[in-house]
Structures are given as structure tokens and as C-alpha cells.
Amino acid sequence: MQDKAGTATGDRASWQTPELLLVLMSVAMPVAFSTWAALLNNFVVERAGFTGVELGLLQSFREVPGFLTFTMIFLLFYIREQNFAVISLLLLGVGVASTGYFPSELGLYTTTILMSVGFHYFEAAKTSLSLQWLDKKRAPQVLGRLISIGSLTSLGVYLVLWLMLEIAGIDYRWIYLLAGGLCTLLAVFMWRGFPYFSTPVEQTQKLILRRRYWLYYALTFFSGARRQIFMVFAGFMMVEKFGYSASDIVLLFLINYAFNWLFAEKIGRLIGRIGEQRALIIEYLGLIVVFTAYAFVENANVAAGLYIVDHMFFALAIAVSTYFQKIANPADLASSAGVSFTINHIAAVVVPAVLGLVWVVSHSMVFLIGTLFAVASLILATNVPEHPAAGNEVRLGRIA
């Protein structure tokens, strides 16, 4: 007998399932990446003397591998997608482990690119495998559950980080080494501990850009632009403008991921019930309010509240993935995962560097540009049909 992923169930232990592998991937990634992200703003300011300009450049360099994620489809000629995901996870671990040893501009650019290659290729492969292995009806809830598991992991990571920084006073170097090393060990376990799970449909081994997917591509593009403003400048504002310490930032992350842990799976079920269009409209309306408020906030506690609300909307982004799962040819999922990550990062490569220059002149203008991105996303979301499917990809502008 075979499971949905195509592996003979008699050839493996009962715990060796595709879903458990996705769970372990959802644990390993945030162990490394959440540590890197939580400490970054304080690390670059305190140890490398970065300003908004250098940080913007670093974040743009970080997004270059995301822009190149379309090359994943060529690498899949030589390596199975499941193995590719695990190797990418290992690169992420090595990049994070080495970060603390290079507190200079060139050193941070180098370790960030290494970490980012692993992170972006892993995320593209994991997204592709999830959409291939999960049933369409269960996908929103299971994807929400995976976010919840990742958030619970991040919650634990941030609690440990806070204890290490505030109580034990451990140096950034050893924290980065511990987190990256643990991610690397988990990747090795996944390589050795799980059989290969084949996919229900053989994937197209070439780049796919289909005109009928245009709305998905547009939603993905603006998602990348908006996310960069949150990832780069919202956190940096907390440190530069309001003087938050590394332990303060970690506490904010603890609150953010506590909400995701509690509500992400429920949000996934909600998306399954109300549909992708309504979920996306709710997300983008909320982000318009949040970004506009960021532009004028002068109180540190209000800014922290906005940061938490901003992060809560991330789980609703599941709707973009499940929308694509419903309209796509199943054979296009692997190729399209790489292409969509590239589209997502077209803006992501440019936005941090350009807005880093704007930041020096006006913090408010950076966030008002984010408001414009959210408005554009809202307009696009109204074009998502209530019941998306192949042949019913958009309400207006259908292309054969």
C-alpha cells in the first residue's frame, strides 16, 4: 500500500511520514532563522556600526538568492526535491552558525548570502513539497498547523534567547553558533532518518510562466515588497528610534509567535471556510491601517503594538498559496515555487537598498510607501474569484 506521497507504507516505520517530515522542517528552519533575525539589528549596530544604509544593503544582498530561486528547477535535474530541501536547510544552519564570527561589513554580507541561499531554496522546496503532498481540502488547515508549529518553535527560541541575553549574558557569537549548529544537526537527521517520498504527479522539469497565473504572480510581487518593509524597517525603527535592546526585541518576537502558535491553524481553517478572496481582503485592509500608523507613531509602546498586529497578518498569506494550489496544473507546482519566489524577490532585492536611502531622509515616507503596496494588493485581491479553479483563475482579465 502507498500513502499520498507515493511511498510504500510497508517500507518504513509508522512515524516516517511526509507530514512529520514537514513538521521537522518547520521546526529546524526557525531555530536558525529566528535567532538570526532576532539578533540582527542589535548585532549590526553594536558590533559592526551599521546605519540604515548598510542595513538596507545587507538586506538587499540577503534577497538576491531569493531572486535567483527560479534556478531551483535546473538543480532538480540532478537532485531529488526532498533531498534538495534538506541540503538547503543545512546551508542555512552553517550560514547562521558562522555569523557571529564575522562582525564586519564584508563578513556580514558574506555570511548573510550563505544563510540566505539555504533559507530561500529551502522555503521554495518546502512550499512545493507541501502543495504536492497535501490534499487541497486539508491544505489550508495543515499549512496553518505548520505555521503554528514553526511559531511554537520560534517562541521557544526567543524565550531561550531572552534568558541567554538578559540572565546569562552570553555573547552573540555563541548564540549564533548554537542555533545554526542545531539546525544543521536536524538537517542531517532528516537526510538519514526518512525515506524518499515520491510525489503524486511528476513535476515539469522546466521553467513555467503561464499567462493564466498572472494574478498569483502579481499578488506574490507585492507581498515581497510589503514584507521587506516589515522585516527590515519596522524592527530597525524599534532599535534606532525607540532604543529597544536585544532582549526587548526578543520579547516582541515572543509575543508575535505566541499569537501565531495559538491562532495560525485556526486562521488556516478560517481561510478554508471563507475562501481566499475574503481572507486576502481582510489581510490587506489591516495592513493599510498598520503601515499608515507606523508612519506617524511616536510612542514606543504603540509602535510595539503595531509590530505585533503586523506580524499577526502573516498567517493570512496562506491564502495566496492555497489560491495557487487550486488554479494550478499539479505538474507545475515545483517549477512555479521557484518562479514565484523569484517574482516575490524582484521587489525584495530593490526595496531595502532604495528605502534605506529614503529612511535617512524620512522614516514616515518608507512606511507610507508600504501603505501604497498594501492598497495595490487590496485591489488585486478583489479580482480573486470566490471559488478559484483551473479555468476560473480571476474574476476579470481571464487569459486563455
Image: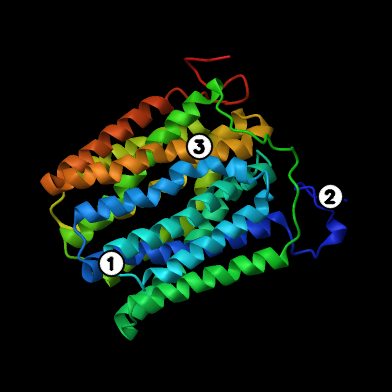
Which is closer to the viewer, label 3 or label 1? 1
Q: Give the residue drawn at x 42%, y 60%.
A: 257
Residue under label 1, please give it: 104
Q: Residues within 10 Å of mark 2 (few under 14, many from 20)?
A: few
Residue under label 2, please give it: 2
Q: Nearer the viewer, residue 48 or 228?
A: 48
- The residue most toward the front is 106
Residue under label 3, please give it: 340
Q: Give the residue drawn at x 62%, y 47%.
A: 130
SS at mark 1? Answer: loop
Which is closer to the viewer, label 2 or label 1? 1
Mark 2 vs 1, N-terminal side: 2
SS at mark 3? Answer: helix
Q: Amino acid at mark 2?
A: Gln
Which is closer to the viewer, label 2 or label 3? 3
Q: Give the residue drawn at x 84%, y 50%.
A: 2
State the separation of the CA atoms marked 3 and 1: 32 Å
**Residue 382, located in which quarter of the rendered image?**
top left
Kindly identify which numbered label has been placed on residue 40.
none
Q: Amino acid at mark 1?
A: Ser
Q: Relative to 201, is 93 above or below? A: below
Q: Residues within 10 Å of mark 1 (few under 14, many from 20)?
A: some
